[in-house]
Image (spheres, rainbow, N blue to C red):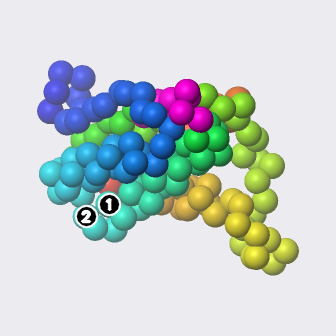
Amino acid sequence: MSQNGWYWAIDRAIPSNTDDGAQVMHELLEQLEQCEWIQEHLFGVNLAVEEALVNAIKHGNQEDANKKVRVEFRLTDDHFFARITDEGEGFDPSDVPDPTADENLDRPGGRGIMLMRNFMTRVEYNALGNQVTMERKANP
């Protein structure tokens, strides 16, 4: 474990494209596997973080090559922390319709946020709505 108590941590700005997002996801999954996280938790963290990254790249930054996505990850053998920030205008997560409501079943919006909330221990957005902070405890 490092001096700050985390086994592994990154804080970097990546270009607004899904290839760079996939590279960061690959690094994260390798680290989770090294910490021996169980498959169920690996799956959930992967899905939630990938949704947040894709949302930041595609919806937040509109895949604008001049904008960056800041990615902060911290990991121990039983705790994962992520903060993902885009340079977009933000949004109000409470305005996103419930994708499980009958009237929204055929609409594409809201599923990513629902998945993040289901697979992570904590999910919070900043006031602007351009930053999501998520945590997962291996044994909540």
- Badge 2: how crowded within 10 Å, few (<14), some, or many (20+)? few
Quadrant of image for the C terminus: bottom left
Q: Is mark 2 on a helix, strand or loop?
A: loop
In the rendering, at what x and y percent does residue 84 appear?
50, 36
Range of magenta residues: 64-71
Quadrant of image for the N terminus: top left
Q: Which residue is drawn at 28% across and 32% down?
A: 9
**Image quadrant assignment for residue 76:** top left
Q: Are marks 1 and 2 in contact (CB under 8 Å)?
A: yes
As drawn, is 53 to the left or to the right of 8?
Answer: right
Outermost residue to the top: 3
In the rendering, at what x and y percent does residue 21 appear?
41, 45
Q: Between marks 1 and 2, how big is the CA–CA gap?
A: 6 Å
Could you say which is closer to the camera, residue 42 or residue 28? 28
Is 67 one of the magenta-colored residues? yes
In the rendering, at what x and y percent does residue 63 appear?
58, 41
Compared to 31, does 38 lie above or below?
A: below
In the rendering, at what x and y percent does residue 117 appear?
56, 56
Identify which amino acid the numbered label 1 is placed on.
Leu
**Image quadrant assignment for residue 71:** top left
Residue beneath disc 1: 42
Residue beneath disc 2: 38
